[in-house]
Every structure is written in structure tokens, then in C-alpha cells.
Image (tube, rainbow, N blue to C red):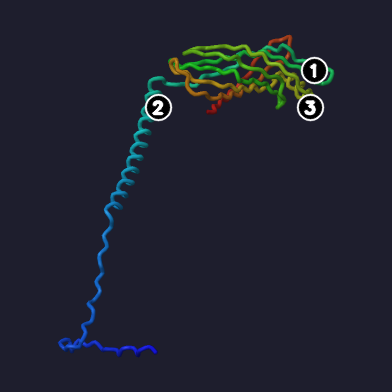
């Protein structure tokens, strides 16, 4: 059998001097906690790294802005201009199968007004002539390097065969009678910038030229009544 539990003893503050009295335990105090010094130093290092990154980024943006300002101030870059100088009709004949054989010789003038910037025209170019959304003929510009303050006129041969249904025949007949034949010339050419003698990045130039001619006869050189140009650049 287990022995009986000991009797409970009441603690009393009034009998503190009594021999058998027991003093209550002292009140528990909150022990202050101290953070490690390594944690503070680690947080300070992260903050310094972030500040350095922001300072470096700000300095880089400032340098790039200064270089861009210097480039535009010294070189004064300008966009080259393009113009269709003339168009010769070599062939414009309806075949027995109601298809249309077309051959044009188009003179395109490219003018570079820059004194310190040249251009390199790539070989992957395309020139297409449309009549009322119908593709008449197409060809390519010659690849060449255009120097500073230079004007170059290119002769581009365009050939094609397209369907020539009754709708197009009627529209062309009406335009010939009025003496106003609308054509759309679309040009796409890759161009590289040359600053001094250093080739830079390449971009693509898109030119849409809306022409109105007075005729489309192989026996007569057509005159350009009006022209409108739209130029776009893709990097």
C-alpha cells in the first residue's frame, strides 16, 4: 500500500518569525531579451546593397541620357526621304485566260540629308504595286551603301501575273476614261545605320506611296498626277 499524502501547510505572512513557517517565493521578474548583434549587422548589409544597386542604376541612366544627348547634338540625325521619280510601263496586257501580265520599271529616289550618318540597304527588300487591292507586280531594291549627304536613284524592275476579272476590267476602264488611275506602291527594306565608319543596329523601313497616273499604256510614258507618302520604322 502507498503511504498517505503529506498534509497541506498554510503559508502565513503574519507568522514569518515562526520556526515552522515557510516564506512564499518571490515575485517572478521579466528577464529582458537582447537581440543578437549579428542580426543587426545582416540587416544593415542588405540595406547597403539595395542602396548601391539604386545608385548604380541611376548612374547608368544618367550616362545613357548624356550619350544620347551628345549623339543628337553632334550628329543631328534625320530620317532619309524616298520618292517615286517615274514609272515606265513595259507590259500591261490581258491574256486569253483573262490574266494580266504586268511589267513596270520604277525609278525610286533615296535622299540622305545627314552629314555624319550613312545607311546600308539590305538585300531582303520587297517592292509591290497594287491596283484596287490586286497585286500587279513585285520586285526588289538593289542592296547598296548610301554615304553622307547622298542622293541615289534606283531603277527597280517589277514583274507579275495576276487575275483580271470583269470587276477589275470595268474599274480600269472607268479610270482610263477619267484619266486618273490609282496605284499603291509598298516598299519594305532593311536598313542599317552607319555612324562614321561603324555599322550600328538594323531596322526596317516601310514606305507606302499612293500614286495617281494619267495612263497605263506601254506606248505612252505615264505622268504622275499626284503622290502621297507614308513612312514607318520598325526596330
- Callout 2–callout 3 Cβ contact below 8 Å: no
Task: Classify mark 1: helix, strand or loop.
Answer: strand
Q: Earlier in the sequence, mark 2 or mark 1?
A: 2
* Residue 145 percent across, percent down from the top left: 53, 13
- 17 vs 31, left or right, is left
Mark 1 vs mark 3: give the one in front: 1
As measured in the structure, the alpha-carbon distance from the residue carrying label 2 to the one carrying label 1 is 55 Å
Task: Classify mark 2: helix, strand or loop.
Answer: helix
As measured in the structure, the alpha-carbon distance from the residue carrying label 2 to the one carrying label 3 is 54 Å
Report the residue marked by disc 3.
167
Query: Which of the 4 image quadrants contains residue 142?
Result: top right
The residue shown at (73%, 16%) is: 102
Residue found at the very far front of the displayed protein: 1
- Towards the viewer: 107 or 157: 157
Residue 68, labelled with which disc?
A: 2
* Residue 58 percent across, percent down from the top left: 35, 36
Report the residue marked by disc 1.
94
- Towards the viewer: 129 or 227: 129
- 109 vs 72, left or right, is right
Residue found at the very far right of the displayed protein: 96
- Callout 2–callout 1 Cβ contact below 8 Å: no
Few, some or many residues within 10 Å of mark 2 (<14, 14–19, 20+)? few
Mark 2 vs mark 1: give the one in front: 2
Query: Which of the 4 image quadrants contains residue 69?
Result: top left
As measured in the structure, the alpha-carbon distance from the residue carrying label 1 to the one carrying label 3 is 14 Å
Few, some or many residues within 10 Å of mark 1 (<14, 14–19, 20+)? some
The answer to whether residue 83 is above or below residue 9 is above
Amino acid at each position: 500500500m502507498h503511504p498517505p499524502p503529506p498534509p497541506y501547510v498554510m503559508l502565513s505572512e503574519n507568522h514569518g518569525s515562526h520556526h515552522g513557517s515557510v516564506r512564499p517565493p518571490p515575485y517572478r521578474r521579466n528577464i529582458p531579451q537582447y537581440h543578437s548583434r549579428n542580426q543587426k549587422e545582416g540587416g544593415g548589409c542588405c540595406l547597403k546593397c539595395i542602396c548601391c544597386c539604386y545608385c548604380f542604376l541611376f548612374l547608368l541612366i544618367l550616362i545613357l541620357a548624356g550619350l544620347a544627348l551628345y549623339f543628337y547634338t553632334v550628329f543631328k540625325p534625320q530620317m532619309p526621304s524616298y520618292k517615286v521619280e517615274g514609272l515606265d510601263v513595259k507590259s500591261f496586257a490581258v491574256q486569253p485566260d483573262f490574266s494580266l501580265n504586268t511589267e513596270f520599271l520604277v525609278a525610286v529616289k533615296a535622299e540622305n540629308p545627314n552629314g555624319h550618318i550613312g545607311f546600308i540597304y539590305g538585300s531582303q527588300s520587297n517592292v509591290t504595286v497594287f491596283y484596287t487591292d490586286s497585286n500587279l507586280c513585285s520586285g526588289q531594291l538593289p542592296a547598296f551603301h548610301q554615304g553622307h549627304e547622298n542622293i541615289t536613284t534606283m531603277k527597280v524592275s517589277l514583274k507579275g501575273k495576276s487575275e483580271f476579272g470583269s470587276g477589275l476590267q470595268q474599274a480600269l476602264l472607268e479610270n482610263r476614261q477619267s484619266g486618273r488611275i490609282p496605284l499603291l506602291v509598298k516598299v519594305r527594306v532593311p536598313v542599317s545605320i552607319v555612324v562614321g565608319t561603324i555599322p550600328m543596329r538594323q531596322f526596317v523601313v516601310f514606305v507606302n506611296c499612293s500614286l495617281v497616273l494619267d495612263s497605263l499604256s506601254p506606248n505612252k510614258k505615264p505622268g504622275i498626277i499626284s503622290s502621297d507618302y507614308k513612312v514607318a520604322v520598325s526596330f
